[in-house]
């Protein structure tokens, strides 16, 4: 893939830890090894907290040997030019350490001419360390030379599909979650959101940062790629969670539930049931086929909980406007914080409110969705009657009908059968 194009870089706003992280990425991209943060920077560098970077560079000598250079890097985020005293203090401090070969002072701003003049005079009589001043122009050039690592810190410098691909890769590899600015950008530019991995990354971030009600990401591809969304929910997201070990189990569950719910109306129920019961059978590769043959542990620890999350959310939402089923408090969508739950936040000596859910089903009442239930339980209730499977095609069909009906009729269903 061609290198992504860099937009204008907002140097005025890149300071503190973000500037430090950017310099860290650039040093690594340039070949720096053994990178480590060190405490104890000196001089007038209070705005950057005295947090500095160490790195080692290896160079080939004319004789064919390998020489090692030890670098110290100090980062100075400024609104105006860097003070001369900050540069002088950093140089004098580094000169007291014989192991330092190169000192880099990096800033999002500029260095004054008197500062550069002082450094030239100092370097004439002091050969070690070599001092390099990286001002805004230097950093700008380095960022454009190394756009991908730079965009790990400042995603907005890359736009379009390149930016989304980078966000998805960061999410899947290290569990880095897109920011609000990313979500807003791609909701406005939905043409770049093209596959299920894009959807799961953005939907997870939405769950963490906000509310899927405002930006329901799963709806963007549910009609075009419903089966892929279910596989992503049951395999892609859980595998990213296992790989990175930094994502939230609860947020993964909520995101997967959203993808499953969005997909159910748009594919044959039997096909959906087959994927839910064993998604590995629909993936290419020997590794997946091996997992498909040993599916039971994955079903117990991953698939069942995720399906139950999707089903439980639907139960909570549908029962809120249903004469047949009463659920209090919600089983999956979260407890209403009003009342005793709220007041205990202000008085921890109060007893913990009971969070167990009471579910009552009035089987003599009809189903507003139109399901012919009679004395049979609502399909949104947990059941052990699915022939040893997570779910059957019949149950998926019933749940699909609930979703399709409620998408058109989200409210005002209680009084249909409340008088029965």
Image (tube, grey):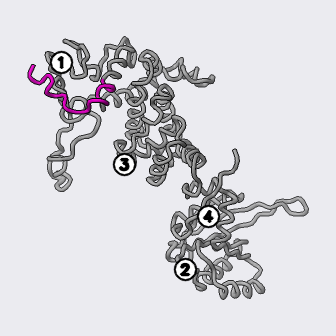
Q: Secondary structure at mark 2?
A: loop
**Residue at x 86% of width, y 59% of height:** 65
Query: Where residue 210 is drawn, which disc sits there?
Result: 3
Quadrant of residue 80 in the image? bottom right
Image depth: mark 3 or mark 4 in front: 3
Indicate whether 157 appears above or below 225: below
The residues tagged by marks 4 and 1 sit, at their Cα atoms, a distance apart of: 64 Å
Q: Earlier in the sequence, mark 2 or mark 1?
A: 2
Q: CA distance from mark 3 to mark 1?
A: 36 Å
- Residue 69's x, y, as percent? 74, 66
Secondary structure type for disc 3: loop
Residue 112 in the image: x percent, y percent? 63, 84
Residue at the spot 38% in from the left edge and 27% down from the top edge: 307
The quadrant of the picture occupied by the C terminus is top left
Mark 3 / mark 2, whichever is N-terminal:
2
Residue bearing mark 2: 80
Q: Which residue is mark 4?
A: 23
Are discs 3 and 2 less than 8 Å apart at CB? no
- Check residue 39 in the rendering and tell me which mark sits there, or answer none: none
Please name which of the two marks, 4 or 1, marks the residue nearer to the observer. Answer: 1
Sequence-first disc among 3 and 4: 4
Is residue 234 in view from this perspective? no
Name the residue that disc number 1 marks.
366
Q: Which residues are magenta?
A: 402-420
Splitting the image into 4 quarters, where does residue 29 fall? Answer: bottom right
User: Could you tell me if the residues under marks 2 and 1 are in contact, i.e. CB atoms within 8 Å?
Assistant: no
Q: Between residue 376 and residue 372, name the one nearer to us.
A: 372
Residue 351 located left or right of residue 2? left
């Amino acid at each position: 893939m061609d290198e992504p194009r860099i937009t204008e870089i907002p140097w005025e706003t890149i300071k503190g830890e973000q500037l430090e992280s950017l310099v860290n990425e650039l040093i690594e991209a340039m070949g720096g090894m053994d990178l480590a943060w060190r405490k104890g920077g000196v001089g007038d560098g209070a705005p950057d907290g005295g947090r500095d970077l160490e790195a080692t560079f290896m160079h080939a000598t004319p004789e064919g040997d390998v020489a090692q250079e030890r670098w110290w890097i100090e980062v100075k985020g400024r609104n105006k030019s860097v003070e001369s005293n900050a540069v002088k203090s950093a140089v004098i401090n580094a000169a007291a350490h014989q192991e330092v070969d190169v000192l880099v002072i990096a800033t999002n701003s500029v260095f004054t001419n008197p500062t550069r003049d002082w450094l030239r005079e100092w370097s004439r009589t002091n050969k070690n360390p070599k001092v390099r001043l990286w001002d805004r122009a230097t950093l700008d050039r380095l960022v454009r030379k190394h756009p991908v690592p730079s965009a790990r810190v400042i995603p907005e410098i890359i736009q379009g599909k390149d930016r989304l691909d980078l966000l998805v890769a960061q999410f899947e590899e290290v569990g880095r979650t897109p920011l609000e600015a990313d979500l807003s950008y791609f909701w406005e530019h939905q043409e770049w959101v093209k596959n299920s991995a894009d959807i799961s990354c953005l939907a997870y971030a939405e769950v963490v940062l906000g509310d899927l009600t405002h930006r329901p990401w799963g709806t963007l591809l549910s009609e075009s790629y419903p089966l892929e969304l279910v596989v992503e929910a049951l395999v892609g997201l859980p595998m990213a969670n296992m790989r990175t070990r930094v994502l939230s189990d609860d947020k993964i569950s909520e995101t997967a539930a959203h993808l499953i719910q969005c997909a159910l109306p748009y594919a044959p129920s039997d096909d959906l049931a087959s994927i839910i019961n064993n998604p590995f059978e629909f993936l290419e590769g020997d590794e997946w086929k091996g997992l498909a043959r040993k599916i039971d542990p994955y079903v117990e620890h991953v698939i069942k909980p995720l399906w139950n999350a999707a089903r439980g959310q639907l139960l909570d939402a549908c029962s809120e406007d249903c004469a047949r089923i009463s659920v209090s408090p919600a089983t999956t969508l979260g407890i209403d914080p009003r009342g005793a739950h709220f007041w205990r936040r202000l008085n921890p000596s109060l007893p913990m409110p009971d969070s167990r859910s009471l579910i009552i089903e009035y089987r003599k009442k009809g189903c507003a969705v139109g399901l012919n239930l009679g004395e049979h339980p609502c399909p949104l209730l947990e059941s052990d009657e699915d022939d040893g499977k997570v779910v059957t095609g019949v149950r998926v069909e019933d749940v699909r009908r609930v979703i399709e009906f409620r998408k058109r009729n989200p409210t005002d269903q209680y009084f249909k059968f409340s008088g029965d």
